[in-house]
Image (cartoon, grey):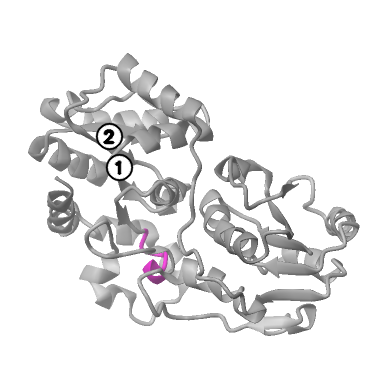
């Protein structure tokens, strides 16, 4: 049996959808499991033995319909028995439609049901603390009636050499081994997913002033200016606990460093999802336009918790569409003051120490 799982888009999406591959391999150990993902997301799949082949999609190369069609017919040559489309948008519709697979599974969407043999209801509300991001992916396995106890948690695999790299870089930067280390997810994937930097500085300062911890910042070199703004706004007491230049050169190095940390705090995004896949406690700050019910995965108040402006000021969200909320995000972010977040953050941190 040959099965293709499709998940375009971001690192977090690809990592979360890898649970489909993990469960398929568990149910069908002799099956060949292929995973079609965007080419910049493959580092989060390294070491995952449930995936027999990673097929890379380049959004820049396949941006015209002709190039997408050409790519789809290349996929068709693989002769898949089953295609599971976890993305369910134009790119994956075309690939699935022309795949030639006997079974094609995805979410039930108006005007797209003809593409698939199995159209799974698109859950609107989470039934458990898994969150909709996990629950929706697992629902795509229901038509197969797998005779297994399903795995619900995405997993990142860290090699021994990567673990040694992390230990070495911590030693190089003289990280205090007697204190726990907190990774701060400082910047989101875009401005509309980034908690205002002047507010973030106050949260970091609260942590540095109140707790004996090491603090690392997660940022790309091109984001150093923004990261430095947060650092400069912190007190001298907090600055002494921040290891500003301790960061990886690529995604695998970040994963290794995150694995050496004890917990993560900050903006929702790939870094948070990777930390969870490494079994690290998390405190997430959601953007006002992101639906918490989707990405607030594994929330138990103890190890994983999150905050959203809607938790504090629900009246600001009444009768507002996603499009309006996105347009108003920067204005709404300004209302999401640190004083709202700090009490919950303190409760979370007190449970970790």
- Label 2 or label 1, whichever comes before in sequence order: 1
Q: Which residue range is magenta in the image?
A: 287-293
Task: Please indicate whether residue 138 sits to the left or right of residue 36 in the image.
Answer: left
- Image spot of residue 322 (x, y percent): 46, 72
Q: Main secondary structure of the magenta part?
A: loop
Indicate which disc residue 197 carries: 1
Q: Which residue is mark 2?
A: 230
Q: Is residue 115 visible?
A: yes
- Image spot of residue 323 (x, y percent): 49, 70
Q: Are marks 2 and 1 in contact (CB under 8 Å)?
A: yes
Q: Which is more toward the observer, 242 or 275?
A: 275
Is residue 55 in the magenta section?
no
Q: State which quadrant residue 237 falls in.
A: top left
- The quarter of the picture where the N terminus appears is bottom right
Residue 152's place in the image compared with 37, above or below, is below
- Image spot of residue 178 (x, y percent): 17, 27
Q: Residue furthest top?
A: 172
At x 67%, y 85%, the residue is: 110
């Amino acid at each position: 049996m040959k099965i293709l799982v499709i998940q375009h888009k971001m690192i977090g999406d690809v990592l979360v959808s890898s649970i489909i591959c993990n469960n398929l391999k568990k149910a069908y150990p002799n099956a060949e499991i292929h995973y079609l993902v965007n080419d910049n997301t493959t580092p989060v799949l390294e070491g995952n033995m449930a995936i027999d082949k990673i097929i890379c999609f380049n959004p820049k190369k396949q941006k015209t319909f002709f190039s997408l069609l050409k790519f789809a017919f290349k996929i068709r040559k693989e002769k898949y028995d089953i295609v599971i489309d976890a993305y369910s948008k134009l790119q994956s519709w075309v690939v699935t439609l022309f795949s030639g697979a006997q079974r094609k599974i995805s979410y039930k969407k108006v005007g797209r049901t003809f593409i698939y043999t199995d159209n799974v209801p698109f859950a609107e509300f989470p039934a458990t603390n898994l969150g909709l991001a996990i629950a929706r992916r697992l629902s795509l396995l229901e038509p197969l009636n797998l005779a297994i106890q399903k795995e619900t948690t995405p997993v990142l695999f860290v090699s021994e050499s990567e673990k040694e790299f992390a230990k070495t870089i911590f030693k190089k930067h003289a990280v205090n081994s007697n204190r726990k280390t907190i990774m701060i997810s400082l910047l989101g994937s875009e401005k509309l997913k980034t908690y205002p930097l002047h507010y973030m500085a106050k949260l970091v300062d609260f942590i540095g002033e109140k707790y004996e911890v090491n603090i690392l910042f997660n940022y790309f070199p091109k984001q150093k200016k923004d990261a430095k703004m947060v650092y400069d706004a912190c007190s001298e007491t907090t600055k002494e606990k921040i290891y500003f230049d301790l960061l990886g050169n690529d995604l695998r190095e970040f994963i290794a460093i995150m694995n050496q940390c004890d917990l993560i705090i900050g903006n929702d995004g790939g870094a948070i999802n990777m930390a969870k896949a490494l079994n690290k406690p998390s405190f997430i700050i959601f953007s006002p336009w992101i639906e918490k019910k989707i990405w607030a995965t594994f929330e138990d108040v103890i190890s994983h918790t999150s905050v959203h402006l809607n938790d504090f000021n629900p009246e600001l969200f009444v009768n507002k569409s996603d499009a309006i909320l996105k347009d108003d995000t920067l204005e709404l972010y300004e209302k999401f003051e640190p004083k709202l977040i700090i009490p919950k953050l303190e409760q979370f941190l007190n449970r970790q120490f």
